[in-house]
Amino acid sequence: MAQDSPLTPRVRGTLDRVQRGWDMLRHRGPGQIQFWFIALLIGTAAGTAAVVFRVAIEWLQNLLYGVEDPNLLASFAADLPWIWVVAIPAIGGAVVGGIVHFATPDGRIRSVADVIEGAALNDGRVEKKAGIASALCSWITLSTGGSSGREGPVVHIASMISSWTANLIRADGITGRDLLGCGVAAAVSASFNAPIAGALFALEVILRHFALHAFAPIVVASAAGTVINRLAFGDVTEFRLPGTTTVEFYLELPAFLILGLVCGLVAVATMRAIFLADDAANAVQARMGLPHFLRPAVAGVLLGLIAVQFPHIIGVGYETTSLALTGSLGVGTAILFVVVKVVAVSITLGGRMGGGVFSPSLMIGALTGLAFGLLATGLFPNQSGSHTLYALAGMGAVAAAVLGAPISTTLIVFELTGDWQTGLAVMVSVSMSTALASRLVDRSFFLSQIERRNVHLAAGPQAYLLCMFRVRSLMRKPTDLGAADTEVCLEMIEKGVSVNETATLETALPRFEESGVAFLPVVRRSAETGALELQGALFHVDALKAYNRALAATAEEEHS
């Protein structure tokens, strides 16, 4: 009999250690130092993607509009021939329509809402093919005059990078979600040069918990994204504020409370206008039988017509935001710009052109705050500070209410402006706006988008976990041990007491409550005869056990 080589035990031992390490990485990665290196790589890749996306937008804008400084696009477009101002977004919309029509099954651009849904329901994974098409559409939209933001597309691009990594290492749900958070944090920090806000945005908005196991790798990735941004653009802030922005003692704080309420209402109006535009476009498209590719093209024409008179709606709008933060606009102009910008954003997103809502909400908030500040300082000049401080607070308040992210948005405002002396005013306004807006919509723009798809993430895991379990995966087949009596099941089907095999526990559990039975027959409609065919039975106790296990696993993840 041949004897094993002396090296065999060592080889086996090495292979065992490698296997244990691989299993640890897949299932307990966030608690291991090795995982942080993966977070660093994801952060570097996501940060690079964010920078490349930004540079690509600037390059195409320069090619189409001929503007060298993208921050002055609105001023430059004001001097272009009107036909060119209309034609560029119209052509861009037509190209986007073609991409959406052939590359997405539903003609819908993927965004931050899909990332949140992927984190909650798909183990931290997002769609790849539709995601790539959406990124391309958003690039074209933002380069050709679409009135939206670049941060949403960047977040989805980063999510695709993290999803690819999670699939590569076959990560489980917890690790996959933490990888997703790493990608998002790096993308946000690279977009705004805001490492603190990037990390908190991933925790607050995407993962929607602050578990310690996720914190370290997400911070590592966020720092990597910031380094990439600073290597490309330098350590500079997006906006510079003039003069002093101090609050005049405590007498001025009630004004910021009121500003927060006003900004909350403006944020709600913005969100509802976008949803109204989407519903109206859906109705017109269905009634006229229009294909998907015409919808963005029509939206592009409408945007171009608006931009002839109001070129400030073109692109992300940082030029107009800077004008508001420096107090360079009057009350009437600021209010008018708010209304027009809301209309333009609604047309862009309702027209399925692509882009995000963060930059538009910053612009709308800064304009709202400026208008409020000019009125407040005019009425009470002796008790008021600078009206530009109101613009800063308004910028944070509207953005926080739209995103449903008061913590990270407050920090983004500070890191965008480099002004940390105004914390009390911004925090007061942000708290009031988010408190009001969250009661008038489903917590945020993103969660409201998901709710419109009949997925109840805003209600918490006790609601959305029910959608994750299909009846057919939990039922007992007629041949299984402890199966329900076939004759009893057939009698119940005759009485209309049954559940379809494709249904989820969201449908099944209320039927248990209504009928008071111990099990429900599981049926499938025959394709040939149309009759209901018995497939098995779903027992109430089996459904509750699966639901309780999922709740326990979610609670463990969020508190570990």
Image: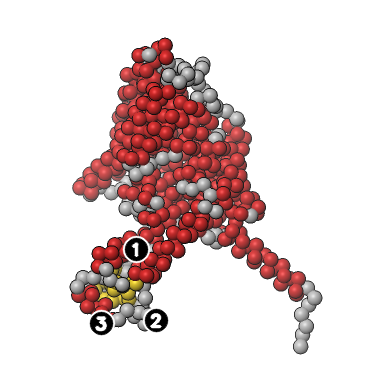
Q: Are marks 2 and 1 in contact (CB under 8 Å)?
A: no
Nearer-N-terminus badge (2/1): 2
Horizontal relation, residue 274 to residue 8: left or right: left
Distance from Cα at disc 2 to Cα at disc 1: 22 Å
Residue 369, above or below 511: above
Which residue is located at x 45 percent, y 37 percent? 406
Q: Which mark is residue 481?
A: 2
Q: Residue furthest right?
A: 6
Q: Residue at x 65, y 62 (%)?
A: 21
SS at mark 2 in the image: loop
Q: Residue at x 48, y 37 (%)?
A: 407
Which sits in the foreground, 100 or 188? 188
Q: Does residue 76 appear in this view?
A: no
Disc 3 marks which amino acid? Answer: Glu
Crowding around mark 3 (Cα neighbors within 10 Å: few <14, some 14 to 19, many 20+) is few
Disc 3 to disc 2, how far (Cα)?
Answer: 16 Å
Earlier in the chain: of badge 3 and badge 2, it is 2
Q: Secondary structure at mark 1?
A: helix
Residue 545 in the image, given as x and y percentages of width and height: 41, 67
Q: Which of the 4 image quarters holds residue 170?
A: bottom right
